[in-house]
Image (tube, helix red, strand yellow):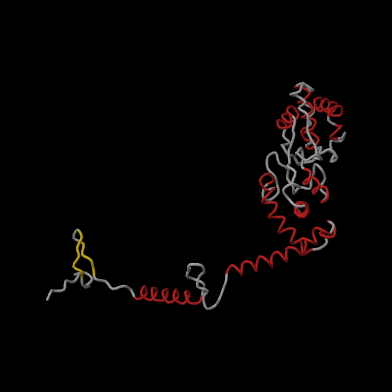
Amino acid sequence: MAVEERDPVSGRPTTGHEWNGIKELDTPVPRGVLMFIIVTHVWALLWWILMPTWPMVTTYTKGILGIDQRQSVEQDLTAAQAERAAWMKAIETESFEQIQSNEDLMRVVRSTGRQLFGDNCAACHGADGKGRANYPDLTDDDWLWGGEVEQIAETMRLGINSRHQNTRVAQMPAFGRDAILDRTQVANVATFVQSLSNPSVTTPENGPQVQAGREIFLTTCAACHGEDGKGNREVGAPNLTDQYWVYGGDLQTLINTIHGGRQGHMPTWDERLTPAEIKILALYVNSLAAAKP
């Protein structure tokens, strides 16, 4: 009979195996692990019996409970489509004013509009609609083509400088590059324009420059931006007297804009989105500005 060898430290028997002077203890599997293995196997066996489990040649075992996840998904989709059809029909048929006065529909607009905005508009205007360099902020209630819901929907439908045959068209000439104004005149106009939104830049030293810029502005720029510089939404000319700028309102950026011109672009969405989706997006974008304190 072999003599059982025990570990001198733990007192447990060894298996007789040794690797590089390290002996393996004959330690039993912990009860907790055994219980876990037993419970999981019992659970798997019950699941095989109760639920659809094993694939066969042309079908599969249905299980005692007869649960069919494909049917469950189809039922959920059918219910969701029926619910969507109800509010979508309301949005399609009701006016903007009626929808805005219906809080239940506006909750749908804010939820669905947020998803549509994220999928189609956020790449340029940001997920929060606050824009970024060279793309306008949609939350400041300062609009190029008008901020009424109908006007927003029309801008989305037609686009700006897009391929739509009735697109909104807007372009600021390159006054310096095309030699309409010389370098001094460009700088004078830029200084005057900056003073419209920031009167503090006007000093006794640059007063003559501001006045010279104003005279050029009246003959060169006022046709679009107005004599008071407040813009014209009929032609997409921005207000130059506020603090909202698409390309920047510092002096150097203004000089660059006047010298090189600007021509923004927004695609037409009537080929990608349905009229109802454009309507939802217009209401959602309008609500961004309305919700801003």
Q: Is residue 214 left or right of residue 3?
A: right
Q: How many marks?
A: 0
In the image, farthest residue toward the left:
1
Q: Residue 14's image quarter?
A: bottom left
Q: Position of residue 94 (x, y in %)?
A: 84, 59
**Residue at (79% x, 61% y) in the render:** 89
Residue 145 visible here: yes
Residue 216, relative to residue 2: is it above or below? above
Residue 231, relative to residue 256: is it above or below? below
Quadrant into which the C terminus falls: bottom right
Quadrant into which the N terminus falls: bottom left
Q: Is residue 91 left or right of residue 80?
A: right
- Foreground residue, 98 or 223? 98
Residue 205 visible here: no
- Foreground residue, 46 or 202? 46
Q: Is residue 119 left or right of residue 58?
A: right
In the image, farthest residue toward the front:
58
Q: Residue 85's image quarter?
A: bottom right
- Foreground residue, 179 or 140? 179
Residue 225, relative to residue 175: is it above or below? below
**Residue at (79% x, 36% y) in the render:** 170
**Residue at (31% x, 72% y) in the render:** 29
- Foreground residue, 253 or 157? 157
Q: Position of residue 141 (x, y in %)?
A: 79, 48
Q: Position of residue 216 (x, y in %)?
A: 84, 26
Q: Position of residue 17 (x, y in %)?
A: 20, 65
